[in-house]
Amino acid sequence: MTETEILRGVLDRWKSAVDAHEPQRVASLFTDDAIFQGLHPYSVGPAGVATYYDAQPLGMSPAYEIRETRRLADDAVLGYLSVDFSFVDRPTLNLSLCVIVRRVGDGWRIGHYQVSKLS
């Protein structure tokens, strides 16, 4: 698989879970030791991810574009993305996202997630 295919496999499932407002399903896509940095204080592990996404408004939906990829190791891929988070009742939020996905068993999970608001 290419780096882009690996990232899309994980990020499409992430988008689907965020769109459905299913925080536990979002959290299941992260490793047990994942460092997660949204626009609030960071957390480590899936529980913090679930808490973060549970607090997000219904109707929030991410649309992402992969800008850069790097194969860090056989079991690790870095992705740099632009993500537009749209909302029902407020303007779209344009963010940059860096993720590292790691192979865990026979699948891939997010081990690092950090968003930045550059503008």
Image (cartoon, grey):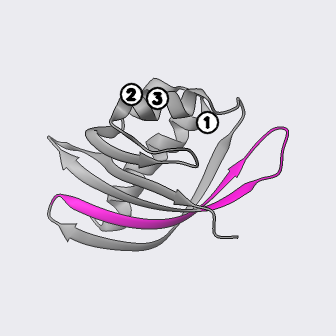
The circle on residue 47 is 2
Residue type marked 3: Ala
The residue at 70%/32% (across/down) is 57
Asked where in the image residue 28 lies, by quadrant, the reply is top left
- Secondary-structure class at tag 2: helix
**Residue of label 1:** 19
Which residue is found at the position 70% from the left and 70% from the top?
119
- Percent of width and height locating residue 21: 60, 28
Asked if residue 84 lies left or right of residue 6, the reply is: right
Q: Is residue 83 magenta?
A: yes
x then y, percent, for residue 103: 20, 50
Is 1 in front, or is 15? 15
Numbered tag placed on residue 50 in the rendering: 3
Task: Mark 2 and mark 3 in contact? Answer it, CB < 8 Å.
Answer: yes
Q: Residue at x 53, y 26 (%)?
A: 22
Helix, strand or loop for the magenta stretch, by majority: strand
